[in-house]
Image (cartoon, rainbow, N blue to C red):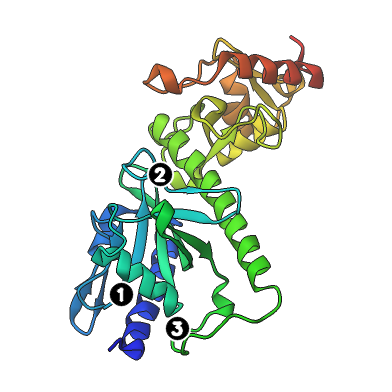
Amino acid sequence: MFDRSHDARVRATAFEWLSEQVSLHGDVLPWTVLTGGFRFDGRRVPLLSQQGIFKPAVMELPLSIRTSPGGPYDDAFRKDGLLHYRYRGDDPLHPENRGLRLAMTERIPLVYFHRMVPGRYLATWPVLIVGDEPEALSFSVAVEDAAHLSLVSEPRMEVAEGAAARREYVTTLARRRLHQRAFRERVLAAYRHQCALCRLKHDELLDAAHIIPDAEPEGEPVISNGLALCRLHHTAFDRFFIGVRPDYTVHVRPDLLEEEDGPTLEHAIQGLHGVRISLPRRRVDLPSVELLAHRYERFLEGGARL
């Protein structure tokens, strides 16, 4: 018989541990941290493994599900706003599939891990299995608001008005966060985790800057539309203090070149004028010449004609 009380204790410990790790590492966590896991009643409990549906030895039901872009399964967010998560194999009665089905019946929350780049995963929790589609060999997964979920209460029919809308909204936010983090992780990896302008190498101070803003049609979250920049140079780029020509050369706004305002302006901004940015090693990751040209036109329109 399923021991809900024991399961709730382990799951609550896992969620608390994840919160602590996010505060230390950010919400994209290293594989080594997640597989190292936490201690529960003297036993080590990892958060995931090579299996996409993962159940640690101390639990009866799965603790997490994992997706890897480009992997063998076509897990994806669909038009209904939910994540469609593929079965393990094509047997609906495979033990891992039965485990997720029971988690759905018992309304047991899980952790969803999405691989951003090799060895780094975005953690989202709690998520619920809200549908089972044997004909499509997949489950439907929604992100839940932790404030509306109890780990210890018995399963019950969800009757509260707005429950479906609430989950759709929270899932949409999680999907947006996933895309933003994926863009950041891939851009930073392409630029070897350093600012393309000043070579600063501390991830905590680095951003993935869009060449064309993501709110615009051309502003796709792809590496060729990104630059790895430190916080200072990201702001300077966004505010058109500096521009990057299609030949990858930095230009500083003329009026700033004439200012005298201490060493920060001199070395961090003025000193970049005419410098070639640091580029990714792979040709496919290079910033788009067309997008840089479009962005540089805007820089010039802002009064930076040279």
The answer to which of 184 and 94 lies nearer the viewer is: 94
Q: Where in the figure is residue 181, as x and y percent of width and height?
A: 50, 46
Q: Is residue 57 left or right of residue 205?
A: left
Rounded to the nearest whole Å, what is the CA distance between mark 3 and mark 2? Answer: 30 Å
Give the residue number, with chain letter if any, for mark 1.
61
Of the residues shown, which amino acid type is indicated by label 3?
Leu
* Residue wearing tag 2: 74
What distance separates the C-alpha of mark 1 from that of mark 2? 23 Å
Local SS, label 3: loop
Residue found 23% across the figure and 63% down from its top = 36
Compared with 154, 220 (above or below) is: above
114 relative to 79 in the view: left or right: left
Using the rendered view, name the quadrant where residue 159 is placed: bottom right
Q: Amino acid at mark 2?
A: Asp
- Residue under pointer 3: 151
Q: Residues within 10 Å of mark 1 (few under 14, many from 20)?
A: many
